[in-house]
Amino acid sequence: MILVPTYKHGVHNAEGCRLVEIVVVLPNAYFLSVASSSNYLSTHSTKPSLHQGLPGSLWKLGRLNHIAIAVPDMEKATALYRDVLGATVSEQVPLPEHGVYTVFVELGNTKLELLHPLGEKSPIAGFLLKNKSGGMHHICIEVDNINAAIADLKEKNIRTLSAEPRIGAHGKPVMFLHPKDCDGVLVELEEA
């Protein structure tokens, strides 16, 4: 059991006492949250899920795999994360089938994927024409069954950027969802 006290900054009860929330992480992966003041106590519990999905769904949404950043200068960007910020970075890898060079920056709980154009038809080249300094390109979320996810999302009128999944930078099947159907965000799904 792990106790995590959290002071609720600026949150007080009717008598003006500051509220404190204690989150108890139990071995069965349940959380028990206790909010208290000198005369107030309430509890609730939730069971977190590493995978989320609709009841009866054939696929589930998983964790954030990476955030991709388009960069105009791969060496400069790699040096920033490695030499200035102290992160572990991968070697630069060309992915001609995707029209990019990639470098992964390890962050512990997720990764950054630095993207630089490879070839004349690179989608990153077009992005950098509009965004000279670079910037966030897409987010990648894991799914447990990419084919079921694609079929389900297509039934819900979410467009994909290709007809079939392709093999991504991690050697796993990936599919990009149209940003106009995802609140302006280019979303990559990757099979976990």
Image (cartoon, grey):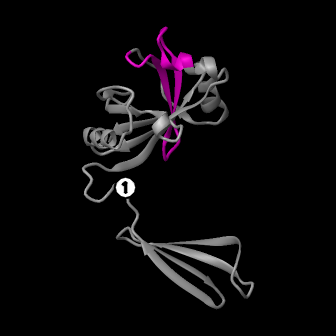
Q: Which residue is mark 1?
A: 52
In the image shown, does 24 or 83 lie closer to the viewer? 24
Answer with left or right where residue 89 lies relative to residue 53: right
Is 165 above or below relative to 52?
above
Please state the horizontal and vertical placement of residue 112, each as a whole percent of the image: 52, 35
Q: Assess whether residue 108 is covered by the magenta stretch.
A: yes
Please state the horizontal and vertical placement of residue 13, each as a whole percent of the image: 69, 83
Identify the image quadrant of residue 18: bottom right
Identify the image quadrant of residue 165: top left
Residue drawn 63% across and 21% down? Answer: 130
In the image shown, does 141 or 176 lie closer to the viewer? 176
Residue drawn 34% across and 70% down? Answer: 28
Total numbered labels? 1
Residue 54 visible in the displayed image = yes
Please state the horizontal and vertical placement of residue 23, each as a whole percent of the image: 52, 72
- What is the span of residues highlighted in magenta in the rendered image? 97-126
